[in-house]
Image (cartoon, rainbow, N blue to C red):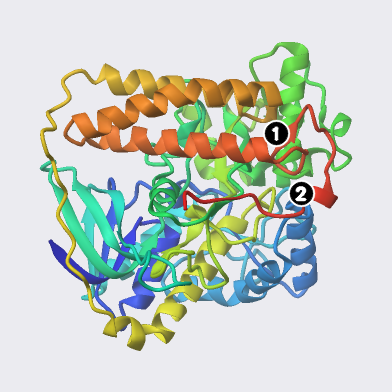
């Protein structure tokens, strides 16, 4: 059993930037389930959206975000994030991030992406996430107050129940049980403050742009511990994932359409204007539905993004990673269109937090994609995710700092170590892989881009026995990373289905054929779930 001041679960931009700041006054232990670079941050191509030009205005970025979120964003949070954004971007530069400068002496080469009314996306070519991760990791490794543990998978949160003790107060988080993947031992990691930065849940679906680690761990753990979660029906499907079985999870950035890329069908005909007046620069929800409808209408396996009309030298400089990867798989983007399909990409909901990143469970924070801050509403505006991560990491660190004197006085009660009981080793991994495959196929086929009430009810019935079976496996067998992740995707899948069933309207990323219109009178509110 070990004790630390602050336990951070996850090593993306939110977790790292938070840890660096809190380490100025506290001891931080950061656990990450694989390597530190195995994060969604590292895969982020587009950039960070912020008002960084005299030609842009806060009010325009706010309005673009509100419009993209389809009237479900919390406007106070949107204004807060947008107005703090420029300072956080320049702070990343202080951390050593090298954003691409403009050709005419401008501080930034600002990109244009769907849903934005101005160029405001600071980027490092098309490898922005990798550059941010590199710089933050260097700072984290240099800090004497940060301990980084790779190959450690959080299992469950440690919770002190106050039921019957203090009326009107929430339970308190005391850290987490963590699986050391190297030796298979479960360690008890106690902490005064615990922070969930474990990313999204793309692996709940059969096809995703997410890394393999994206199994919804933070949301599942928080929900089991009694914290509120919100808006899990809003799963963003990236409209343009590279259609190639060998190129796993590779997405074609929103910025390609921002720089003039055109969506075309098999006949080479542009089609987006049929589905949205904004055409190829519509928001992601609209583009994903447009592509889905076009594919269903034609029976085609994919559509295409064509940017071959742009100068070859421009494409190679602006999109070196996309150009190189596509070329490696036989597609020259300077000469031919890129085959694409939608894929699960981003979780707009998550653990419900306030304007400081604090959850409903005392001393538990959630940041980044794991959190539901109110910024994204029913649909995330392109490149607002890295912005949200750095703004809320800063605010979360400030909250811990401002309250550190009181937090530091809290006594840490003893907790029992993980109990193995009579559990035995699992000898047939098919018990896990079969259930994993069933859940992901059910979610893809019935809870995807377009939904029906009948399909949701069918999934509910089919997922219940799977949940019971997984719960039985969890107690009968010694823990493995696969078993822990299976349990989490099952919990998150059920939460997504329950949330989708509760919202009987179409809004943003949640499109219900049975209820095609938005119903502001009944549903202009978050969908909140809690096991309490």
User: In the figure, 132 relative to 81: above or below?
Assistant: above
Asked whether disc 1 touches disc 2, contact meaning CB atoms under 8 Å apart, the reply is no
Residue, far top: 299
Residue, far front: 164
The picture quadrant where one finds residue 251 is top right
What residue is shown with label 1? 288
Residue, far bottom: 405
User: In the figure, 459 relative to 284: above or below?
Assistant: above
Question: At 77% from the left edge and 30% from the top edge, which residue is drawn?
Answer: 290
- Secondary structure under the numbered disc 1 in the rendered image: helix
Question: At 50% from the left edge and 20% from the top edge, which residue is drawn?
Answer: 462
Question: At 21% from the left edge and 35% from the top edge, which residue is drawn?
Answer: 480
* Disc 1 crowd, CA 10 A, few/some/many (<14, 14-19, 20+): many
Residue 247 horizontal/vertical position (percent): 46, 27
- Secondary structure under the numbered disc 2 in the rendered image: helix
User: In the figure, 391 relative to 345: above or below?
Assistant: below
Instruction: Say which quadrant the N terminus sits in.
Output: bottom left
* Disc 2 crowd, CA 10 A, few/some/many (<14, 14-19, 20+): some
């Amino acid at each position: 059993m070990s004790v630390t001041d602050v336990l951070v679960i996850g090593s993306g931009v939110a977790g790292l930037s938070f840890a660096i700041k809190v380490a100025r006054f506290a001891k931080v232990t950061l656990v990450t389930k694989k390597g530190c670079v195995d994060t969604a941050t590292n895969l982020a191509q587009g950039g960070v959206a912020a008002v960084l030009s005299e030609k842009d205005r806060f009010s325009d970025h706010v309005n673009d975000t509100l419009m993209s979120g389809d009237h479900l964003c919390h406007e106070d949070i949107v204004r807060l994030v947008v107005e703090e954004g420029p300072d956080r971007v320049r702070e990343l530069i202080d951390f050593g991030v090298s954003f691409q400068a403009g050709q005419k002496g401008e501080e930034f080469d600002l990109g244009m992406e769907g849903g934005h009314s101005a160029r405001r996306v600071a980027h490092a070519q098309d490898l922005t996430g990798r550059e941010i991760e590199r710089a933050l990791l260097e700072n984290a490794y240099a800090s004497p107050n940060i301990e980084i543990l790779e190959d450690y998978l959080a299992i469950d949160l440690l919770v002190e129940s106050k039921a019957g003790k203090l009326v009107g107060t929430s339970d308190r988080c005391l850290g987490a049980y963590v699986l050391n993947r190297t030796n298979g031992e479960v360690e008890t990691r106690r902490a005064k403050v615990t922070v969930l930065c474990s990313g999204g849940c793309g692996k709940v679906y059969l096809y995703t742009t997410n890394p393999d680690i994206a199994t919804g761990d933070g949301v599942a753990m928080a929900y089991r511990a009694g914290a509120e979660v919100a808006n899990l029906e809003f799963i963003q499907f990236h409209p343009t994932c590279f259609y190639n079985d060998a190129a796993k999870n590779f997405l074609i950035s929103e910025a390609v359409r921002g720089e003039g890329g055109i969506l075309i069908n098999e006949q080479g005909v542009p089609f987006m204007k049929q589905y949205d007046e904004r055409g190829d620069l519509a928001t992601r929800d609209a583009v994903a539905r447009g592509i889905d409808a076009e594919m269903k209408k034609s029976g085609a396996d994919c559509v295409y993004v064509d940017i071959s009309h742009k100068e070859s030298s421009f494409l190679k400089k602006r999109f070196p990673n996309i150009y190189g990867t596509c070329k490696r798989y036989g597609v020259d983007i300077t000469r031919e269109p890129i085959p694409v399909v939608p894929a699960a990409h981003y979780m707009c909901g998550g653990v419900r937090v306030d304007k400081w990143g604090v959850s409903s469970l005392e001393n538990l924070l959630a940041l980044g994609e794991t959190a539901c801050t109110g910024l994204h509403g029913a649909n995330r505006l392109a490149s607002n995710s890295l912005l949200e991560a750095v703004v809320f990491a800063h605010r979360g660190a400030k909250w811990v700092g401002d309250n550190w004197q009181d937090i530091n006085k809290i006594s840490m009660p003893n907790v029992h170590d993980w109990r193995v009981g009579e559990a035995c080793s699992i000898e047939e991994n098919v018990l896990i892989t079969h259930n994993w495959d069933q859940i992901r196929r059910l979610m893809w086929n019935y809870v995807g881009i377009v939904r029906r009430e009948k399909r949701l009810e069918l999934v509910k019935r089919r997922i219940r026995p799977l949940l019971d079976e997984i719960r039985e496996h969890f107690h009968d067998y010694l823990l493995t990373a696969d078993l822990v992740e299976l349990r989490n995707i099952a919990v998150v899948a059920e939460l997504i289905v329950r949330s989708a069933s509760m919202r009987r309207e179409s809004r943003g990323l949640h499109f219900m054929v049975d209820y095609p219109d938005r119903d502001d009178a009944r549903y202009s509110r978050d969908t909140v779930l809690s096991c309490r």
